[in-house]
Image (tube, helix red, strand yellow):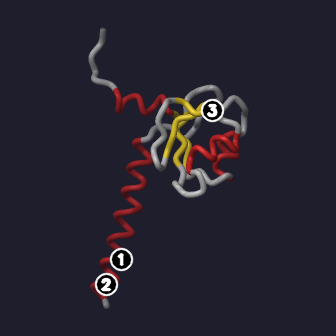
Amino acid sequence: MRLMIDGVMLTAACLICGSLLISASLGSDIPVVGKPVLVVAPPWDGGAAAIVRAVGGVAVGPVAAPFAMFAVFEHKGFAEAALKAGAWTLRDAGALSAFCTTGETT
């Protein structure tokens, strides 16, 4: 029984630490009106796309992932509204550009 409890506690600690690392690597959690935002949401009930539509945002890009999509919102209070609608987090998409660069300049 003790071994099972230790396993559960270790798994929970790994999940929490992993979530914090991923969240930190996704950049600022202060999205800006009129700038691209990464909306992360559970995939059920229409996922991030349904939340973006419900809050009045516009999808950016041709592809949405099961848990996330890029969108632009043109009104204040969109972040709070999206979180109330079920989004897990919203992140400034500009901060993610560090993952998409080769470091080369032209």
Whether 99 is drawn above or below 21: the answer is above
Q: Nearer the viewer, residue 16 or 106?
A: 106
Pinpoint residue 9: horizontal percent, then vertical percent.
36, 75
Q: Are marks 1 and 2 in contact (CB under 8 Å)?
A: yes
Give left or right: position of 25 versus 82.
left
Q: Residues within 10 Å of mark 3 (few under 14, many from 20)?
A: some
Q: Residue at x 58, y 37 (%)?
A: 30
Q: Nearer the viewer, residue 60 or 95?
A: 60
Q: Secondary structure at mark 2?
A: helix
Amino acid type, residue under disc 2 in the picture: Met
**Left or right of residue 84, residue 103 in this image:** left
Q: Quadrant of the C terminus?
A: top left
Image position of 80 with respect to 4: above or below = above
Position in image of residue 102 (x %, y %): 28, 23
Q: Would you name the residue on which mark 3 appears?
A: 58
Residue at 40 percent of width and 42 percent of height: 25
Vertical comparison of 56 with 20: above or below: above
Q: Which residue is mark 2?
A: 4
Residue labelled with disc 1: 8
- Residue projecting furthest to the top: 106
Q: Earlier in the sequence, mark 1 or mark 3?
A: 1
Dot 2 alpha-carbon crowd within 10 angstroms: few under 14, some 14 to 19, many 20 or more = few
